[in-house]
Image (spheres, rainbow, N blue to C red):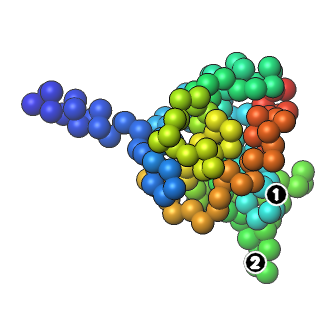
Amino acid sequence: MKFIIGLFALFLSAPVIAGGNNNMVRFPAGYREAFTLYHTMNRQNNEQIVDLYANEAAMKSAKDGTLANRSIIVMEIYAPELDAAGKPVTEPGGLLLKAGLSAVAVMEKRTDWGETYPADERAGDWGFALYTPDGLPKENDLVCQACHQPLSGQDFLFTLPRLAGQ
């Protein structure tokens, strides 16, 4: 019986594979405890606020300007708190106030994707996936790699300078 309970616990803690265009980038269970929160910022659309986490491989290699194989970046995407007029509320420094976690985006860098993950669905060696806050695959009508592809000079990351400065 203990074996079955242990097997069930292992199943629950295993990473979930994302659906959609890519079945390769896994949800990193326990990332809040295992990764480093390296930045909080308003997203470029100024309609969301995000917390950015990086695993140890990313943290150690960021200063070199190119993240190491198996680097993972997690972006928690929060809806903003809205005022009575329906406009986002900001802190004195300009950051949006968080109302609720709406999605978790994951970027994983791997040099061994091969033919299983087509290059035109990636940005360099980076793969992408979107999850619900519970780690379940989430529908995504955005093409993540399209926004990241122009950033080849900074390893396809919008926040590489911030990550490297840690």
Camera-nearest residue between 23 and 138: 23
Outermost residue toward the right in this view = 93
The residue pinned by badge 1 equals: 44
Disc 1 residue type (three-letter): Gln
Outermost residue toward the left in this view = 1
Locate residue 13, reporting x and y percent.
36, 36
Q: Residue at x 46, y 37 (%)?
A: 29
Q: Splitting the image into 4 quarters, where does residue 95 fall?
A: bottom right
Q: Splitting the image into 4 quarters, where does residue 110 fall?
A: top right
Lower position in the chain sequence, tag 2 or tag 1: 1
Q: Residue at x 14, y 27 (%)?
A: 2
Outermost residue toward the front in this view = 115
The residue pinned by badge 2 equals: 86
Disc 2 residue type (three-letter): Gly
Q: Residue at x 65, y 32 (%)?
A: 54
Above or below, 98 relative to 29: below
Q: Count how many numbered circles sit on residues in the image.
A: 2
Q: Residue at x 76, y 26 (%)?
A: 66
Above or below, 17 relative to 137: above
Image side of residue 149 versus residue 101, left or right:
right
Image side of residue 86 versus residue 104, left or right:
right
Camera-nearest residue between 75 and 141: 141
Marks 2,1: beta carbons within 8 A: no
Above or below, 111 relative to 87: above
Q: Splitting the image into 4 quarters, where does residue 45 fall?
A: bottom right
Locate residue 159, reporting x and y percent.
79, 39
Q: Identify the element where label 1 is drawn.
A: loop
